[in-house]
């Protein structure tokens, strides 16, 4: 998944931005 500049600037220590984590979490929750 391509990270935007703003996501990289706001990235946590593991390199994932908060918005990106929420997006991935939402997809995971949506799975059966």
Image (cartoon, rainbow, N blue to C red):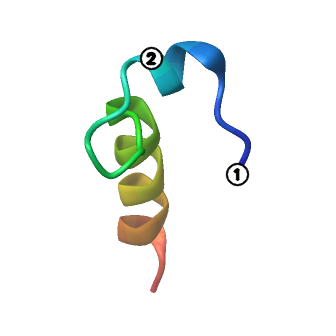
Question: Farthest residue in the left direction?
Answer: 13
Q: Which residue is mark 1?
A: 1
> Separation of disc 1 and disc 2 at Cα?
16 Å
Dot 1 or dot 2: first in sequence order is: 1
Q: Residue at x 41, y 44 (%)?
A: 16
What residue appears at the point 50 percent right and 24 percent down from the top-left corner?
Answer: 7
The answer to which of 18 and 31 lies nearer the viewer is 18
The image quadrant of residue 19 is: top left
Tell me the residue at 28%/37% (across/down): 12
Quadrant position of the C terminus in the picture: bottom left
Picture coordinates of residue 22, whole percent (x, y)? 35, 43
According to the picture, the residue beneath numbered tag 2 turns out to be 9
Q: Is residue 1 left or right of residue 7?
A: right
Along the viewing direction, whichever of 5 and 22 lies nearer the viewer: 5
Residue 9 vertical position relative to residue 2 in the rendered view, above or below: above
The part of the image, by quadrant, that contains residue 4 is top right
């Amino acid at each position: 998944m391509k990270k935007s500049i703003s996501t990289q600037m706001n990235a946590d220590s593991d390199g994932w931005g908060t918005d990106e984590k929420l997006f991935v979490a939402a997809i995971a929750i949506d799975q059966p």
